[in-house]
Amino acid sequence: MSSRTTGSVTVTLDGTNRSASLPLLSGSLGPSVVDIRKLYNELGIFTYDPGYGATASCESRITYIDGDAGVLLYRGYPIEQLAEQSDFIEVAYLLMYGELPTKAQLAEFERGVTLHTMVHEQIRRFYDGFRRDAHPMAVMCGVVGAMSAFYHDSLDINDPEQRRIAAFRLVAKVPTIAAWAYKYALGQPFMYPRNDLKYAENFLYMLNAVPAEEYRVNPVLARAMDRILVLHADHEQNASTSTVRLAGSTGANPYACIAAGIAALWGPAHGGANEAVLKMLSEIGHPKNIPAFIEKVKDRNSNVKLMGFGHRVYKNFDPRAKIMQRTCHEVLAELGIKDEPLLDLAMELERIALSDDYFISRKLYPNVDFYSGIILKAMGIPTSMFTVIFAVARTVGWVSQWKEMIEDPSQRIGRPRQVYSGPTQRDYVPLGNRG
Ligand code: ACO
């Protein structure tokens, strides 16, 4: 890794003459960090940072976010340029290997991914164990985790070739697994992947086609799906990525680690937010109900959040949200949806929230999920699949971050500390002696 020591920070324990000089490390962009690793040895104290909002857990060369400036870079390239000029498969190569591919490299990579899209036939039977009304994210956690039971030749994390194959398999097979989770819930036959289709096209085909008739993928919708995949492909050390890294730090196999990431993504504060946006919009029902809803959101005791607003890192605007908003209009125009009540409601909610001091003072802006839910709904994809699509996109980010961690010589098992505030040591009282 390549961060440099550019200074030091001295920590002094007030009221004592004890202090520690800690190195200040600088990367290529972003704030410097204090290396606190020797703090406990020198002063006998830990640091306290619930939610890790002020803690860099690793050094990474993959994704950079400047939350105040609304900047998101994959390997240095702005998300806006990648969303407009590139596509998911090229972005996947970039995230995994660090550089944009040549034509030949891209063709070989795309072919490699395409040739891995089928899953072991016995995995089909695995689905039968789930209830038909299971949430597709539950199926995703189970089936992706179960890949470790099927692909024994790519479980040795110390073998670079096995790591490479596992990464390929995950990126290639996750759309198939996701589409089958959907088909299983519908009770429709599973559609096998088609090697003549591009990544996003093939995903839409497996989601929407049925064997009884020909299905042509709409190019505008394929482009929109591709863009959703690009925008969600990585986002540095977010909750699910940190979960993948933490699970991977124990030496767990990559399929198990990605299943852990899927579980973390499922929550409504993270990947479940686009599903929650749609639920919120249908609960509000009509623009006339917005003011009352906003009042509820502002009431501290109500515990109601404006879903699709706010972000742990972006405190100005989410650059992905701007691109999503444009794509949203393209999709609605293509589908001939002029008066989509949910979109009208979303736009009105956005307008009111952006002019309300509660949201302005807290720097709460629409995030990517505010619009992606509306696009997916317009495309006919049910809300329960929204987070699954996010998981399909993020798999390449998880895999890239997992590989980077395994290949980092400074990597150790992730093991946070705590402030213990429970009972101090006390003696066991036999049952008969307890009052
Ligand atoms: N609606 C209403 N108030 C909010 C919202 C919201 N969506 N988000 C934050 N706030 C308020 C908080 O209550 C807090 O108010 P206070 O200062 O009066 O206590 C203040 O804004 C600061 O918020 P934090 O909770 O400190 O923000 P944090 O960084 O911890 O949370 C989070 C970020 C979880 C994303 C939050 O904004 C949220 O729950 N948003 C809604 C869910 C959502 O859209 N998640 C998607 C995230 S993007 C992604 O995963 C792709």
Image (spheres, rainbow, N blue to C red):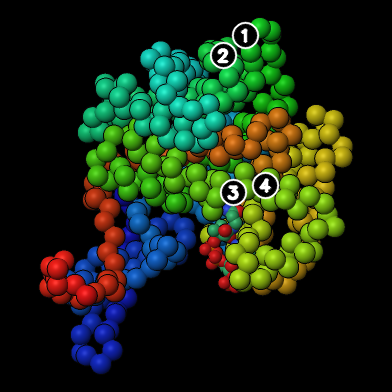
Residue at 69% of width from left, 8% of height from top?
A: 214
Q: Residues within 10 Å of mark 4 (few under 14, many from 20)?
A: some
Callout 1, which amino acid? Pro
In terms of depth relative to the viewer, which is nearer, 416 or 301? 301
Spatial CA distance of label 4 from label 1 is 32 Å
- Residue placed at 22% from the left, 33% from the top? 158
Q: Which residue is mark 2?
A: 189
Q: Label 3, on which residue?
A: 273
Q: Nearer the viewer, residue 188 or 271?
A: 188
How far apart, in angstroms, are the residues tagged by discs 2 and 3? 29 Å
Between disc 4 and disc 1, the foreground one is 4
The residue carrying pointer 1 sits among few (fewer than 14), some (14 to 19) or many (20 or more) residues within 10 Å by Cα, namely few
SS category of the residue bearing label 2: loop
In-front residue for pair 22/186: 186
Instruction: Specify few, some or many for label 2: CA neighbours under 10 Å numbering under 14, 14-19, or 20 or more.
Output: few
The yes-or-no answer for disc 3 within 8 Å of ligand 1 is yes
Q: Amino acid at mark 3?
A: Ala
Q: CA distance from mark 1 to mark 2?
A: 8 Å
**Dot 3: few (<14), some (14–19), or many (≥20) neighbours within 10 Å?**
many
**Label 2 CB-ligand 1 distance < 8 A:** no
**Given the image, on which type of amino acid does mark 2 rest?**
Pro
Front residue of 203/233: it is 203
Q: Which residue is mark 4?
A: 279
Q: Which residue is mark 1?
A: 211
As drawn, 65 above or below 406: below
- Circles 1 and 2, Cβ within 8 Å, touching? The answer is yes
Res 38 visible: yes
Which three-letter amino acid code belongs to the residue tagged 4? Lys
The reply to whether callout 3 and callout 1 are in contact (CB within 8 Å) is no
Looking at the image, is mark 1 or mark 2 earlier in the sequence? 2
Quadrant observed for ligand 1 in the rendered image = bottom right
